[in-house]
Amino acid sequence: MTLERVEERLRSSERHLDVAPVPGDPVEVALVIGGPQRPVTRRSAVLVALFEEEGEAHVILTRRSLELRHHRGEIALPGGRSEAGETPVETALREANEEVGLEPVRVLPIGWLSPIVTFSSSSAIWPVVGLLSERPTLTADPAEVDRAFTISLSELLSDGSFAEERWRRSEPRPGADADGYFPIYFYRVPEDLIWGATARVLTELLCLVTGVEWPGAHRVWG
């Protein structure tokens, strides 16, 4: 699981910035509800920051502060709400700097993963993939982050780490099957559990790196 392999797979799957720019607003918001276009009104971005150590790619993760109003205590990628006029790359770099002290000049943005849509609130998250030349020194902002840590992609792929459940809601959502069921992903890590949007982003990344087709590979963006 080297950085070279990650970059090669991003390029071959047309998620590398050399091949395709970061996509615009997801059109799923309109397609799912079967009605008029509902513009994305709340934009966020997260940084999938990767570095290599002893031939293994590692990713930076955080545990959100227990004092936050939403998603407190959950494992997350550095990121947050976009400011007016910001691109997803600019948001991801700024938020990573604010949350864990990762200087933007040390990050080389190389690609992107599928935007995540929450159509009920007309919001979307853009995951941006960036490379670091070495393991960074992380300084967590206690107002937002309880702790910052790293884990190798190989650990996420190890036996017993991954689990998938099928959930269902009364209203349709992106990625649901004909009966309304959709997958929720989980990763068991030391003393914790990754799930939700973070697990979805990591699952897409791992699918791309290992050559497994990502279920959302054929979605369309504006």
Image (tube, rainbow, N blue to C red):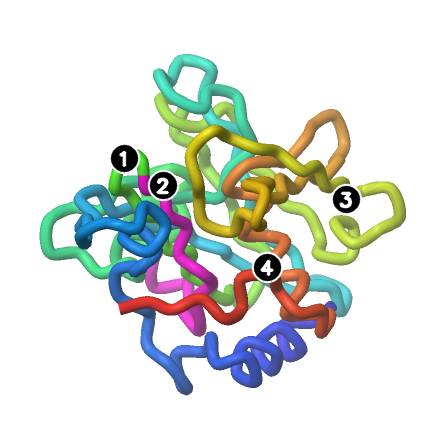
Relative side of 190 to 43, left or right: right
- Between circles 4 and 2, the one closer to the viewer is 2
Q: Earlier in the sequence, mark 4 or mark 2?
A: 2
Which sits in the foreground, 73 or 40?
40
- Between the C-alphas of marks 4 and 2, the distance is 17 Å
Counting from the top left corner in percent of width and height, residue 189 is at 74, 36
Q: Residue at 60% across / 40% down in the picture? A: 181
Q: Pick out the residue farthest to the left.
A: 84
Label 4 secondary element: helix
- Between the C-alphas of marks 3 and 4, the distance is 13 Å
Q: Residue at 76% across / 40% down in the picture? A: 163
What residue is shown with label 1? 121
- Between the C-alphas of marks 3 and 2, the distance is 24 Å
The magenta span reads 104-119
Counting from the top left corner in percent of width and height, residue 137 is at 52, 46
What residue is shown with label 4? 204
Amino acid type at mark 4 = Glu
Which sits in the foreground, 70 or 212?
212
Q: Quarter holding the C terminus?
A: bottom left
Q: Residue at 32% across / 77% down in the picture? A: 21
Tell whether position 10 is magenta: no
Relative side of 51 to 38, left or right: right
Labelled disc at residue 118? 2
Tell whether position 118 is magenta: yes
Counting from the top left corner in percent of width and height, residue 132 is at 51, 64
Disc 3 to disc 2: CB gap under 8 Å: no
Disc 3 to disc 4: CB gap under 8 Å: no
Amino acid type at mark 3 = Phe
